[in-house]
């Protein structure tokens, strides 16, 4: 080889290779923008994001609304007076054989299914009266209620948002009847106690569990306190045969989540029980699979956990994946417990509605105050149901649409006998120019999928609607016409925080009536009311 060619090879070839490798690496890794200032609204959709949009409403007869009444909220008066509200509502709803239990932030009430309140409103920590410690003494928000259909029991989870002093001796489980105060005849709103002073002690946070001893929520409850070193925000409890799974957020400025599971079988009997936790770094809000129906997963099936892709705190507000973890708990030898993931599940591209949580997003009539979208996360519940021929999961979140508003992205995933998880169908419900956001999903025993969500825009006060599909309809579409649960009659002007989440629950009596709760404002009101409705889709009688 001539000398000048050898000099070129020695001098320039390494430079060319270095440039080529750098350019390839830049194309291969995701582009991470700087995190935008809080409240920044991010519009538009990623390329291909409109490929699964449903831009026309279903043509088949709408979902039947068979029950509708006001729950906790402005103007509500129950056996124990009027409700004292905190915002956001943090709506949670559970349905048993004869009763409904609702929580809003730090208050709860019990209803008969005809809408008659029989208990409350009272602070959520009232179920821990006589238990002592932080569970009885501290009234934090974010209480969540579930109904365990496998055991016909109620579960109430209450996080403690401040550090608590260590108790003398282990608190242990304590069983006691629910204390029911005398009914009151006046409707005066009694002020809530303060949220608690700043942390002044060196100790842990806590998560409080109450599990009913029977199917009667007005009877006895088993109470538990588990301390944790990490802040227990935004709990999302789920029922699984081997445990009650509760993921939480460890802080608003930390890309880290805490995944815990409590020893369900012992808690159902009021016995001493354990809570086992794992830290998952670098992830959005987690959703744990929550069973609909009484068919259980195959023995030994790991618990499945999903999260949306992207990371708002790092400026990544779009993705084309869901993230999946598998949590296998071994209560006989907890050292053999495993957590595997994340596994990437490809989906149609999406961008968080308005760029994520705490954004000035959804417009309202007559005010410049816009409402938060919570667009950075999958919403409660991640539904799991075992059908005759397959296992299915349904997940939902709020995303930007091609029309420049907000739509409900939903997925039905299938779980094979080998445990593989794949997307069976997906769609973005955006049939017109209204914003639809903060959805919650359910699947009935026929495989019908129902979705409740908030709806509104600059001409429409925020209210609540419901849509659905049958398995026979075209994949990726909600073929049943939208049904209105309640129309709003005023804007919310006091804060951008709107609900934080809505909630579905399947009735255990027929395993097909889907109950749903969400917020709205009455005419002239300055604070939210909630509306509880029951819906039935084809085949459900």
Image (tube, rainbow, N blue to C red):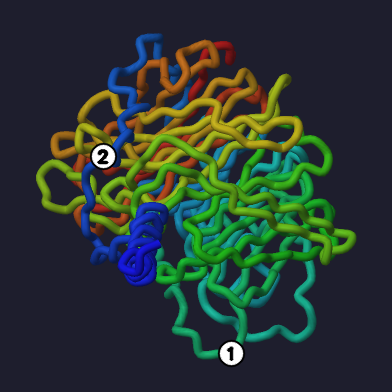
- Identify the residue shown where x is 30% and y is 58%: 358
User: Tag 1: Cα neighbours inside 10 Å, few (<14), some, or many (≥20)?
Assistant: few
Is residue 325 visible from the viewing direction of this image?
A: yes
- Identify the residue shown where x is 34% and y is 27%: 51
Circle 1: element type: loop
- Identify the residue shown where x is 36% and y is 22%: 483
Q: Position of residue 413 (x, y in %)?
A: 57, 32
| Front of the two marks 1 and 2 | 1
- Identify the residue shown where x is 45% and y is 30%: 451
In the picture provided, is 514 more to the left or to the right than 96?
left
Among the two numbered marks 1 and 2 on one chain, the one whose residue lies closer to the N terminus: 1
Splitting the image into 4 quarters, where does residue 331 fall? bottom right
Q: Position of residue 218 (x, y in %)?
A: 67, 48
In the picture provided, is 408 more to the left or to the right than 45?
right
Residue 462: image tag: 2
Is residue 488 visible from the viewing direction of this image?
A: no
Task: State the count of labels.
Answer: 2
In the picture provided, is 254 more to the left or to the right than 521?
right
Q: Position of residue 431 (x, y in %)?
A: 28, 24
345 vs 191, nearest the viewer: 345
The residue most toward the front is: 2
- Figure quadrant of the N terminus: bottom left
Q: Is 474 situated above or below 503?
A: above
187 vs 278, nearest the viewer: 278
- Figure quadrant of the C terminus: top right
Residue 202: image tag: 1
């Amino acid at each position: 080889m001539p000398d000048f060619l050898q000099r070129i090879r020695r001098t320039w070839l390494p430079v060319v290779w270095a440039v080529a490798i750098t350019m390839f690496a830049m194309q291969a890794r995701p582009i991470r923008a700087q995190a935008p200032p809080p409240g920044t609204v991010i519009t538009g959709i990623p390329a291909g994001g409109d490929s699964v949009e449903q831009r026309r409403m279903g043509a088949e007869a709408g979902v039947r609304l068979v029950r509708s009444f006001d729950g906790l909220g402005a103007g509500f008066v129950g056996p124990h007076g009027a409700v004292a509200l905190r915002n956001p509502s943090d709506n949670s709803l559970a349905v048993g054989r004869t009763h409904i239990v609702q929580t809003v932030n730090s208050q709860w009430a019990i209803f008969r299914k005809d809408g008659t309140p029989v208990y409350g409103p009272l602070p959520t920590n009232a179920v821990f009266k006589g238990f002592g410690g932080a569970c009885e003494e501290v009234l934090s928000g974010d209480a969540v209620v579930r109904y365990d259909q496998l055991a016909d029991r109620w579960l109430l989870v209450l996080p403690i948002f401040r550090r608590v002093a260590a108790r003398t001796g282990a608190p242990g489980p304590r069983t006691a009847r629910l204390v029911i105060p005398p009914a009151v005849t006046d409707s005066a709103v009694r002020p809530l106690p303060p949220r608690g002073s700043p942390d002044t002690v060196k100790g842990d946070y806590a998560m409080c569990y109450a599990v009913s001893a029977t199917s009667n929520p007005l009877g006895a409850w088993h109470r538990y306190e588990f301390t944790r070193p990490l802040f227990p925000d935004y709990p999302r409890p789920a029922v699984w045969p081997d445990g009650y799974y509760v993921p939480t957020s460890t802080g608003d400025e930390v890309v880290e989540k805490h995944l815990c599971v409590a020893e369900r079988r012992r808690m159902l009997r009021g016995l001493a029980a354990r809570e086992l936790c794992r830290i998952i770094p670098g992830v959005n809000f987690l959703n744990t699979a929550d069973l609909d129906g009484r068919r259980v997963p195959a023995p030994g099936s790991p618990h499945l956990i999903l999260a949306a892709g992207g990371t708002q705190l790092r400026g990544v507000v779009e993705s084309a994946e869901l993230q999946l973890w598998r949590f296998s708990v071994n209560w006989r030898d907890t050292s053999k417990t495993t957590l595997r993931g994340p596994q990437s599940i490809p989906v149609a591209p999406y961008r968080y509605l308005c760029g994520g949580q705490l954004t000035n997003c959804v417009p309202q009539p007559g005010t410049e105050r816009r409402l938060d979208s919570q667009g950075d996360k999958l919403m409660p519940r991640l539904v799991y149901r075992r059908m005759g021929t397959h296992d299915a999961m349904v997940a939902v979140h709020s995303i930007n649409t091609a029309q420049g508003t907000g739509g409900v992205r939903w997925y039905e995933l299938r779980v094979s006998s080998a445990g593989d998880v794949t997307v069976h169908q997906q769609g973005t419900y955006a049939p017109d120019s209204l914003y639809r956001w903060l959805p919650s999903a359910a699947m009935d025993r026929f495989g019908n999928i129902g979705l409740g969500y908030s709806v509104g825009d600059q001409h429409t006060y925020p209210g609540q609607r419901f849509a659905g599909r049958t398995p026979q309809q075209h994949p990726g579409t909600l073929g049943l016409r939208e049904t209105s649960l309640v129309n709003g009659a005023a804007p919310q002007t006091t804060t951008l925080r709107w609900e934080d989440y809505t909630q579905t629950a399947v009735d255990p009596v027929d395993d097909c009536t889907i109950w749903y709760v969400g917020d709205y404002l009455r005419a002239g009101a300055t604070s939210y009311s909630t509306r509880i409705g029951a819906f039935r889709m084809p085949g459900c009688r």
